[in-house]
């Protein structure tokens, strides 16, 4: 099943929603933060104890190719690895170009009623 995704421009609202998800029983292993700015991604994820899309979520071949890729290519690959189509990944990467941060929840059944 495709993950649930929400876009944010306000980091505080995103962190409130992550806290709400966790309070409703969503495990932090099912909550991911992604943005164009690695420092921003890490800061938000660390503040709410959420995940980033890292080595364990990606195919090893893609991890190696991402080392030599542009950041946009890397972000699109990460989105495809977690369950989005190429077209969706391209659109979400464009949204991140505009400064948006993505909240991705892989436990869609529990999260649908919360967000």
Image (cartoon, helix red, strand yellow):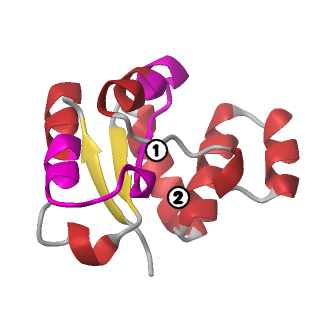
- Which tag is nearer the camera, tag 2 or tag 1? 2
Where is residue 41 shown, x and y percent of the image?
45, 28
Q: Is residue 114 above or below residue 76?
A: below
Marks 2 & 1, CB-CB < 8 Å contact: no
| The stretch drawn in magenta includes residue 84 | no
Q: Quadrant of the N terminus?
A: bottom left
Q: Is residue 57 above or below residue 43?
A: below
Sequence order check: which comes first, mark 2 or mark 1? 2
SS label for mark 1 = helix
Residue at image x 55%, y 71%?
85
Residue at image x 30%, y 32%?
48
> What is the residue that sits farthest to the bottom in this orientation?
1
| The stretch drawn in magenta includes residue 31 | yes
Q: Is residue 18 above or below residue 100?
A: below
The tag on residue 111 is none
Q: Nearer the viewer, residue 49 or 13?
A: 49
Q: Is residue 91 left or right of residue 18?
A: right
Sort mark 2 into few (<14), some (14-19) or many (20+) by Cα contacts within 10 Å: many
Where is residue 51 shown, x and y percent of the image?
47, 42
Residue at image x 27%, y 60%?
26
Q: Is residue 10 left or right of residue 76?
A: left
Q: Which residues are magenta?
A: 18-42
Where is residue 95 shown, x and y percent of the image?
39, 43
**Disc 2: which residue:** 89
What's the CA distance linking mark 2 and mark 1? 9 Å
Quadrant in the rendering for residue 4: bottom left
**Disc 1: which residue:** 94
Quadrant in the rendering for residue 77: bottom right
């Amino acid at each position: 099943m495709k993950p649930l995704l929400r876009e944010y421009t306000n980091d505080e609202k995103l962190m409130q929603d992550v806290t709400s998800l966790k309070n409703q029983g969503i495990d932090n292993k099912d909550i991911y933060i992604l943005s164009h700015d690695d420092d921003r991604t890490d800061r938000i994820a660390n503040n709410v104890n959420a995940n980033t899309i890292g080595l364990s979520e990606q195919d090893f071949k893609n991890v190696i190719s991402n080392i030599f890729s542009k950041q946009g290519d890397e972000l699109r690959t990460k989105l495809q690895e977690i369950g989005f189509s190429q077209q969706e990944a391209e659109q979400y990467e464009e949204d991140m170009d505009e400064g948006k941060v993505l909240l991705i929840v892989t436990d869609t059944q529990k999260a649908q009623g919360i967000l």
